[in-house]
Amino acid sequence: QLRHNAPRRDVEFHVVRLFIDDEWQLPVRSEGYAFPTRAGESPRLAAEYTFTRIKWNAGLRDADFDPRNSAYEFKR
């Protein structure tokens, strides 16, 4: 769990909880809680991701992670 005490431009969440699988040591869930808008208010869940169908050895290549890959049609 990571907690930021005060909002900053480079910090999106007040609290982030990251859940790690014991066997594979990989993240399987994350929760992001927004900064409270009033004193004494509990942080509100603003984002959550749960990874349930993790595919190992998906056959990805270095080009799949290259922003210069023309297949992605990124505009410059």
Image: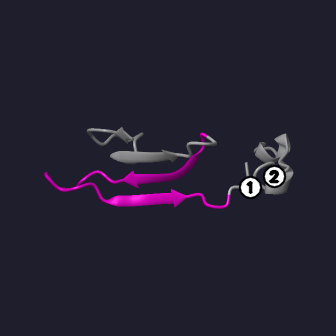
Count neighbours of disc 1 (C-alpha within 10 A) and say few if under 14, some if 14 to 19, many if 20 or more: few
User: Is residue 55 shown above or below 15?
Assistant: below
Depth check: give the residue in front, 39 or 8: 39
**Quadrant in which residue 67 is drawn:** top right
Residue 42 location in percent, x, y?
A: 22, 56
State which region is magenta.
25-53
Mark 1: secondary structure = loop
Which numbered marker is on residue 55? 1
Whether residue 44 sits left or right of residue 69 in the image: it is left
Residue 50 location in percent, x, y?
A: 54, 59
User: Is residue 68 shown above or below 50?
Assistant: above
Name the image quarter holding the N terminus: top left
Which numbered marker is on residue 18? none
| Residue drawn at x 30%, y 43% as measured from the top left | 7
Whether residue 11 sits left or right of residue 69 in the image: it is left
Residue 76 location in percent, x, y?
A: 73, 48
Mark 2: secondary structure = loop
Q: Is residue 45 magenta?
A: yes
The amino acid marked with disc number 2 is Ala
Name the residue tied to disc 2.
Answer: 58
Depth check: give the residue in front, 73 or 13: 13
Q: CA distance from mark 2 to mark 1?
A: 6 Å
The amino acid marked with disc number 1 is Lys
| Residue drawn at x 26%, y 38% as measured from the top left | 5
Residue 65 location in percent, x, y?
A: 76, 44
Are the residues at dot 2 and dot 1 in contact (C-beta closer than 8 Å)? yes
Task: State the residue lying farthest toward the left.
Answer: 39
Whether residue 66 sits left or right of residue 9 in the image: it is right
User: Is residue 43 shown above or below 61?
Assistant: below
